[in-house]
Image (cartoon, grey):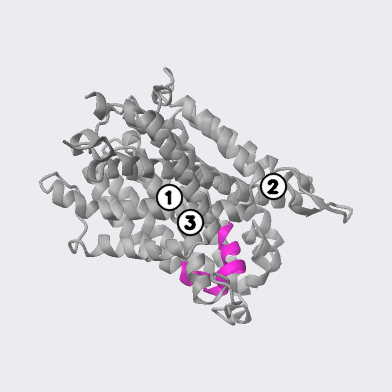
Amino acid sequence: MTTPLWRTKPVSSAADSQTGLRRVLGPWQLVALGIGVTIGAGLFSLTGVAAGQNAGPAVTLSFVIAAVACGFAGLCYGELAGMIPSGGSAYSYAYASMGELIAWMIGWDLVLEYTVGAATVASSWSGYLASLLGGWGLPIDPRLLAPPLTPVTLSDGTITTAWFNLPAACALWIVTALLMRGVSESAKVNTAVVVIKLAVVAIVIVVCAPHVHMANYHPFIPENTGTFGSFGFSGVMRAAGMAFFAYLGFDIVSTAAQDSRNPARNIPIGIIGSLLVCSVVYVIFSLVLTGVVNYRLMANDPSPVATAIDTAHLPWVASLVKLGITSGYVSVLFGMLLGQARIFLVMSHDGLLPPLFARLNTRTRTPWTSHLLFAVLTSLLAALVPIGVLGNMTSIGTLLAFIIVCASVPVLRRTQPDAPRQFRVPGGAIIPVLGVLSCGAVMVSLDRLTWIRLIVWLIIGLVIYFVYGIRNSRLCRD
């Protein structure tokens, strides 16, 4: 008899679509969702932080390393999404392949990934909003733009400490209100914002390229300071770990399976399409950014693109670009907050969380309870926690999810060889194994404190599972 910890859901059950959500998303809307979430804080904010603190100009190599590892994971996501078109993403894949305990842990990990990720994006958005309004002569009090105890300089030159990041918290509540109106309406707004965002990226690359100074690329890989992760090759790998946050978008596409009209076909298209587009954009963009602004100036800069525009002395384009980036962050928050609620919805539907989180609003068919819960959590994190800490926490959660997804492919090929697959990863087990190894290598390069936070979070999740989930699982009742 299978013990409760390792009981698995049949593939057909894992793909169960009876959640009550409206199926309104097509393939191009899913590609837009992936691009919209992926091209955001990872590109517009963490590029500068990773360059300034870890890799220098070689942050471009970090994006390449992350893209290769994400490519392996993306192919595996594509096979599993076509096979198990469930809104639970890696959680549902693990439930069908590795059992309930692993599924719970990865679902709980995804909650960390999306919650902290949304807070990171909102924190970065706050910096761009302040830069934009400051250029219009409408400055925001610096004490309302950073976490508590962060040193800030007031307009009169006085150095004091910040109170909390108010704009970041407000942004999360605004996007939550948009999501609660319904996915169809939100998706239209998201698609329009993605078009604006890609136009902004193209403008930045074109207008900043002539202002690249080759001296900023020397040394391309700065010498290690004697601390692991502080420049040198270990710094490139540490920055690659942070860069995984930047590739979060294609993972979120898989959480929208139950909002898709034909998930078995559309989800693989959304995942692989958005990953290809964003990988090319990241490499070109990071190369231009570090050529315009010396990496040493970006170590603690939440809005390096605004700095690059100012450094290039392009006032005519500064407001346009900053406005586009500020509005573009809406699509990132949209995807992350959508993913959070969908994971809780599926876990609640499986009985591992209280039925409260599976309850939908009768008019909009959206999970209001989950949206409100995560609005509270993410707004508190965004208001109170530094962006560098948030970025690392998101990356380690993403990497763990990728490893589980890659490992699920060979497991399901062995246990469910005859299950229909809309897409199949080529090369047998080679790509899944490379995905596990590459993601694992980047994961171990992250700092000890980030690992401790992940372990503590997973322990909290295990307590909840053994107190509630294991007794109320639908597999236990069926």
Measure the alpha-carbon separation of dots 1 and 3.
8 Å
Mark 3 or 2: in front is 2
Q: Which residue is mark 2?
A: 147
- Give the secondary structure at mark 3: helix
Q: Which residue is mark 3?
A: 246
* Count of numbered tags: 3
**Residue 187 visible in the displayed image:** no
Q: Which residue is mark 1?
A: 249
Q: Position of residue 124 (x, y in %)?
A: 61, 51
- Give the secondary structure at mark 1: helix
Of 130 and 360, nearer the camera is 360
User: Which amino acid type is marked by label 3?
Assistant: Ala
Residue, x 51% and y 53% (percent of image)?
452
- Give the secondary structure at mark 2: loop
Query: Which stretch appears magenta?
Result: 45-62
Q: Residues within 10 Å of mark 3 (few under 14, many from 20)?
A: many
User: Which amino acid type is marked by label 1?
Assistant: Gly
> Reading the chain from its start, which is encountered first: label 2 or label 1?
2
The answer to which quarter of the image holds residue 439 is bottom left
Mark 2 or 1: in front is 2
Q: Is residue 395 magenta?
A: no
Answer yes or no: do the residues labelled 2 and 1 have beta carbons within 8 Å? no
User: Which quarter shows the N terminus?
Assistant: top left
Of 321 and 264, nearer the camera is 264
Q: Is residue 61 magenta?
A: yes
Q: Position of residue 283 (x, y in %)?
A: 47, 67
What is the chief secondary structure element of the magenta stretch? helix
**Residue 24 visible in the displayed image:** yes
Q: Is residue 74 above or below residue 230?
A: above
